[in-house]
Amino acid sequence: MKQLIKTILIFVLVLIFFSYAKEKNKYETEALQKIEQLEILMAKAKKNTIDVKREETLLWFSKEFIKFANWDEANKDQVEKSFSYDRFYKKDPVKWAIELPNLERKKVIEMLGKGILQLQKVLDGSIVRRPTPKVDWGGIKVTDRALINKEKPVFLHDYFSKTVGIPLTNKDVYNDHLGNMFHGGENLYEEHQDRAINPWLLNEDGSFDADRLKLLTNIPDTNIGFLYLWNSGLPDWLKTKDSTVQVGRSLFMGLDIDNPLVRNHWGKIANKVGELTNGKKVTQLGFVLANEPHWFAEKEYWTQKFGEMNSISIHTLNKFRKFLSNAYNNDIKALNKNWKSSFEDFNAVEIEIPISKKNQGKPIWYDWCRFGMARSLDWFTYIQKELRVLYPEAPTSIKMQPRYFAGNYRSHGLDFESLTELTSVIGDDAKAQSSRSFGAKNPESWENRYAYSWEEISFSYDFMESVSPNKIHFNSETHFLSLSNWKDLNTPTDYVRNVFWLATLHGMDASTSWFWARDPDGSPENRLEGDLDFWDPGLGGAYAGSANMQPQMVNEIAQVFMDMNSFSEEIMALREQRKSLRVFYSETSAINKKQHMTELFELYESLYFEGIPLGYATEKIIKKQNHNNWDAIVVYKTQFVTDSEFDALQDYLNYGGTIILDNKESLSKNEYGKLRKKKLQKGKGKLIFVKSNSLEGMKKASIESIPKNLSKIKLTESNGTAFKGCTWRVVKNKKGGYWVNILNIGKNDAKLKLSFKDGKKPIITNMLTQEKLKADFDLKSNGVLLLKITE
């Protein structure tokens, strides 16, 4: 009986396969017909001197994915294996492998149809597009303000981890369509040696491996790029010399950052790398000093099962003891009182790592979290210093994950403010998703209101940009396309357009998305072929359902960057607006409170849809930056602050600043929970207490505190919910009128009305198409508008 059932199943699958094979001809034929139709229109457009770079990219992706679909169909077994490694698709890999080729062809047909319709409108004059500038990948200038391409700002995109095994000079992989940034990851390296700069460069005898160095020095000096310092592992000889070199490791940093042997080893490598790459174009976007660093030291955090901070070395413990001695002015009695301990001196201090989450809010928790941040800062300061010995102007960044700023966990060992200050480039790998995570049983927090999870981008980018407003911003691994627990083979193109526009508006100058792994013939890159067994828990299943199988996704990325680069000056004007309203951020409260960032986001969210550019204030920002950069600071549910944080706020008031304070609870305790006797005094400034102690009250008081900086334009929204979904900005056009950017990140379509507050009638033009709009208009969910408004 079992054999009969098996025979029937095989027969059914064969029928399905041949059915799809027949359909393949139909879909491929239709796609090829549309390609021919598009090429005819493009020829006509060229005769009329109409820019067709957008169509050239559409054509390239269409032809590539027709080729890819044919490969996927001819290699069904390998595609099935790829799906079998993913946590979601492995439930039915046969189904997905059979459906994929025609799904790719259908998506090609859809995007060709959309492109044909747009070009027809251009040809008949219904819409007018601004020509998109050609990116000179070898001629980009890096300034403090922006990346410059032919005297204008430019936003760049490529892919992180790009077709490993294919040379940087291969035009099928490195081009204007996919992107053309150079890097040190083109070769197929051994485990833990994913990039050209890794611990294996230095031999045990102190010499450098000449062959491995060539992988760095042979990178052509022709294109803008970036280089990773890859530190996920260590050579065996180093581990033999000292068996503790990996104690206290993190997930992606397989070493003890406090171990003298490790520090000396990496210091020499950084020094040598600086010497060999000084002034090379591949360093223009910077040396990424670490890939996703974090050191979560709390029990039961998910990284524990991958060896992260399961214990600490004697080097780390001694460093902690010294840190405590300084923090407590060498007063062991003060520490014992705080910790409820009885250590004889600081050399006797012990701590259990991983630490119990039950300690949050207690002095021992605060001291450890602050130390964890200080030790990582010390490591990156050291590596950057060694790198710059022979390359003094070496640009640097750190690929920090903004979720660890936006989230409530604080044992991660990352001081986002200090690390952003340290490096010359703002670095991150923010994520977003347009549908629910795999396995989620309940709706996620953003689903009730929004089209996608935008919080991590806006909330954290505004912080980093407030800390370092005069640095370029490089997201070296955007996770807007897929995550280990989220992928969608039908990812909406409107989402792709909206999320990249949002990130760019909030400061992102360059980005590389996870990931591109197709060889030019359509097969997966070398490392993803055959049986997969990676130390990285997310890599094996990363290919299935990714951008490599979604023509509509990768084409839309290229299209939105061409559109943004056509209007780069306007976008820069919008994002460089003075941020008159600042949210006060205290790391002290973030460490001590279980839900501090959740509560702070509620305030941020309430103001985000009011057409007001938002920023942050911290103790350092108040002390270091010109107070004229803003008009008011909002303090909300921030009970714990250090004395120096409190004093910075008081000094700001004394100099004439404005503070909006929610209630007497805020600022009432120090870092150890002791009540503060001091209360803020208005001094020469304004101290506004919100008596209602409500979010709506805080919002109202905050907006009323900056009347001179509110726009003369008003946007009203109706979307069928009680919440706004359109975030918008207004900036004056020096030639007259205003530029308005509107992004509908709400889950519903919105009915909008633009008006001048003085009653004058606006004349509205869609800058992307030059179409005129009435004052009342609709904007679909995930819609993007860039408008010119005059009286």
Image: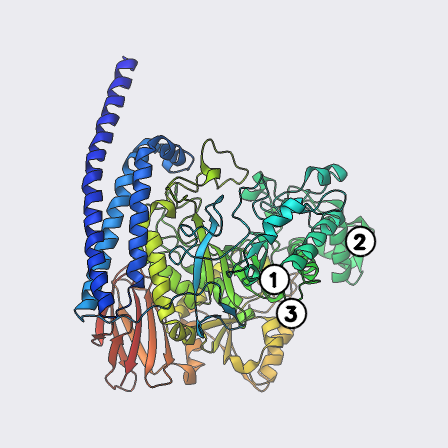
- Within-10-Å neighbours for mark 3: few <14, some 14–19, many 20+: some
Circle 3 residue:
676
Q: Residue at x 18, y 41 (%)?
A: 26
The image shows residue 441, relative to residue 461, as above or below, that is above
Residues at marks 3 and 1 touching, judged by CB atoms closer than 8 Å: no
Circle 2 residue:
346
Give the side of residue 55 with respect to residue 151, left or right. Answer: left
Q: CA distance from mark 2 to mark 1?
A: 28 Å
Viewer-nearest of discs 2 and 1: 1
- Within-10-Å neighbours for mark 1: few <14, some 14–19, many 20+: many
- Disc number placed over residue 450 in the picture, else none: none
Q: Quadrant of the N terminus?
A: top left
Circle 1 residue:
419
Give the side of residue 195 with respect to residue 113, left or right. Answer: right
Q: CA distance from mark 3 to mark 1?
A: 29 Å
- Within-10-Å neighbours for mark 2: few <14, some 14–19, many 20+: many
Q: Residue at x 24, y 54 (%)?
A: 112
| Position in image of residue 152 (x %, y %) | 43, 74
| Position in image of residue 197 (x %, y %) | 62, 50
